[in-house]
Amino acid sequence: MTRTVSQSLRWLREEFHSDRFAPTLQNRFRIDAELGRSGMGTVYRATDTLTGELVAVKALNSEVVARVPDLVERFVREGEALRQLNHPNIVRMIAAVQEQTQYNLIAECVSGGTATPLLIV
C-alpha cells in the first residue's frame, strides 16, 4: 500500500506517539507539522535538514491526481513559474519532489498566518 505524506505522518505519530520519528522527503525535508488542508492537497511545515531552514511542503492529494490527470502538469507548471520569479513579495521556490505517486512543491515557509483577511472580495 502506498501512503501519502499525510497518512505516513499520522501513522508514525500513532505508532510511536511522538514527533521525533517525523517522515522525510528525499532524505532532506523533515515534515514537522500540518499547516493546512484543502481539496487539492495539504501544506506542511518542514525543516530542510541540509540548511536548517523552515520550509513549506505543498503535497498534492493523490486521490485528486487519480481523478484529474492534468493536475500534475498544472502543479509542475506552478513550480516552474515560481522558480523563475525572484521578488521579495513572492514565496521562493526551493524544489519539486516526487516520491512514487506523491507530488510535492517545497517553498520557503512564510510565517504570519493566512492571507484571507487581506483579500478584498
Image (cartoon, helix red, strand yellow):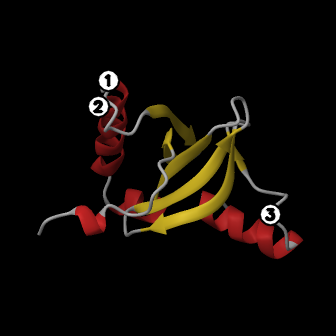
Q: Quadrant of residue 67?
A: bottom left
Q: Is residue 2 visible?
A: no
| Circle 1 crowding by C-alpha within 10 Å: few under 14, some 14–19, many from 20 | few
- How far apart are the alpha carbons under marks 3 and 2? 33 Å
Find numbered disc 1 in the image and state the secondary structure of the residue it sits on: helix
Q: Residues within 10 Å of mark 3 (few under 14, many from 20)?
A: some
Residue sitting nearer the eye, 48 or 119: 119
Residue at point 56% right, 57% down?
44
> Would you say the residues marked 1 and 2 are in contact, meaning their CB atoms lie under 8 Å apart?
yes
User: Residue 78 falls in which quadrant of the image?
Assistant: top left
Residue at image coords 70%, 70% = 10
Q: Residues within 10 Å of mark 2 (few under 14, many from 20)?
A: few
Under mark 3, the amino acid is Asp
Residue 72 in view of the camera: yes
Please give left or right for residue 103 compared with residue 45 in the image: left
- Work out which quarter of the rendered image holds the C terminus and state it: bottom left
Q: Give the answer, above or below, for where 51 lies relative to 65.
A: above
Measured in 3D between alpha carbons, the distance from the residue under mark 1 to the one under mark 2, in whole angstroms, is 5 Å
- Please report contact status of discs 3 and 2: CB closer than 8 Å, yes or no: no
- Residue 19 lies, with reference to residue 109, above or below; the image says below
75 above or below 32?
A: above
User: Where's residue 101, x and y in %?
Assistant: 53, 49
Farthest residue in the right direction?
16
Element under disc 2: helix
Residue located farthest toward the left when viewing the structure as drawn: 121
Q: Position of residue 79 (x, y in %)?
A: 37, 36
Residue at the spot of label 3: 19
- Please tell me the numbered disc located at residue 84: 1
Residue 68 image point, x, y percent: 31, 58
Q: Secondary structure at mark 3?
A: loop
Q: Which amino acid, by three-letter code, is at mark 1? A: Gln
**What residue would you read off at disc 2?**
81
